[in-house]
């Protein structure tokens, strides 16, 4: 019960890492407000959590829509009266486009979901965390936020930005009792690859040169355990940093 009675907002909860993290947090006693665009997936998550010690409360929403961010935060505060933990997990890929073929629509979508959405969620939540004197923010980054050839240009840019944001917030708000960290997963079995349409083969071929260095493909539950550590008081001295969970891929 490492998260007993903690109130969590978790975005991108309909599948993969978000889904696994929501269930793991609820196992540890948290009240998890799960956010995603697919309402039916959130209901499935609620049903899967009924025997757990915590609870899962669904709010359909899109982190790239300002009104949805307002709704999620206000509804959480109205229901539970506080927000202890924010997990910015929602993310999309970018069809592996690069500088010579990047499309404005793809660039805007990826930056809106992967970087601007987390910023706006944090901006909305952090005044309440400051007022209550504590808070914990966890961002789902990627090894693509550490290296240049782990995705298309928009994706890599967004995740580099997210890691920079994590460092900035972790340092600036430490004296307010607020921590901010990121998790950088490597290759993990999730549905995110299904968002790719007509990938650019030139870029993909270059990226695939490093695939032979994959030591292993991870499970979403393995990343959820890292999230749990960062969400718990066991990580109280961890702040403004990024934990890489990639099975050793970037050690090569």
Image (tube, grey):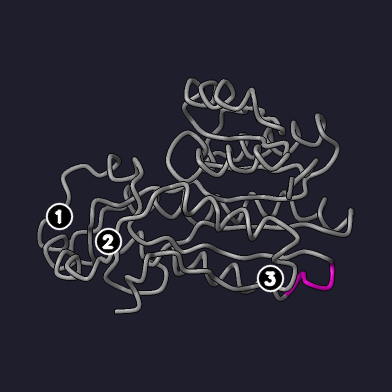
Q: Gap in Å between the C-alphas at discs 3 and 1?
A: 36 Å
Residue for badge 3? 170
Residue at 77% from the left image edge and 57% from the top image edge: 135
Magenta region: 172-176
Of the residues tagged 2 and 3, which is closer to the observer? 3
Q: CA distance from mark 2 to mark 1?
A: 9 Å
Query: Which is more foreground, mark 3 or mark 1?
Result: 3
Instruction: Give yes or no for contact between labels 3 and 1 (Cβ–Cβ under 8 Å).
Output: no
Q: Residue at x 82, y 34 (%)?
A: 80
User: What percent of the width, then of the height, locates residue 102?
Assistant: 25, 58
Q: Residue furthest bottom?
A: 252
Lower position in the chain sequence, tag 2 or tag 1: 2
Residue at the disc numbered 2: 152
Residue 188 location, x and y as percent?
A: 35, 52
Q: Secondary structure at mark 3?
A: helix
- For residue 30, above or below residue 213: above
Name the residue nearer the viewer: 108 or 222: 222
Image position of 250 (left or right of 95): right
- Please tell me whether residue 74 is drawn above or below residue 177 in the rendered image: above
Residue 200 disc label: 1
- SS assignment at label 1: loop
Assign the N terminus to one quadrant of the image: top right
Relative placement, left or right, of 170 versus 214 is right
């Amino acid at each position: 019960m490492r998260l007993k009675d903690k109130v969590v907002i978790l975005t991108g909860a309909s599948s993969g890492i978000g889904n696994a993290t929501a269930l793991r947090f609820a196992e540890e006693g948290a009240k998890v407000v799960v956010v995603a665009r697919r309402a039916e997936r959130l209901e499935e998550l609620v049903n899967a959590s009924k025997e757990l010690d915590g609870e899962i409360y669904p709010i359909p929403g899109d982190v790239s829509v300002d009104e949805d961010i307002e709704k999620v935060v206000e509804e959480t505060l109205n229901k539970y009266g506080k927000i202890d933990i924010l997990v910015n997990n929602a993310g999309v890929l970018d069809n592996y486009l690069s500088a010579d073929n990047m499309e404005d629509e793809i660039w805007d979508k990826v930056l809106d979901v992967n970087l601007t959405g987390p910023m706006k969620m944090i901006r909305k939540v952090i005044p309440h965390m400051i007022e209550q004197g504590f808070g914990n923010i966890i961002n789902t980054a990627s090894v693509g936020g550490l290296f240049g050839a782990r995705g298309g240009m928009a994706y890599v840019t967004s995740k580099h930005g997210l890691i920079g944001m994590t460092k900035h917030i972790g340092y600036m708000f430490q004296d307010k009792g607020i921590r901010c960290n990121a998790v950088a997963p490597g290759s993990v079995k999730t549905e995110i690859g299904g968002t790719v349409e007509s990938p650019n083969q030139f870029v993909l071929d270059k990226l695939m040169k490093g695939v032979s260095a994959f030591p292993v493909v991870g499970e979403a539950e393995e990343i959820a355990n890292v999230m749990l550590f960062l969400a718990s008081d066991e990580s109280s001295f961890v702040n403004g940093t990024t934990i890489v969970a990639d099975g050793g891929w970037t050690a090569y």
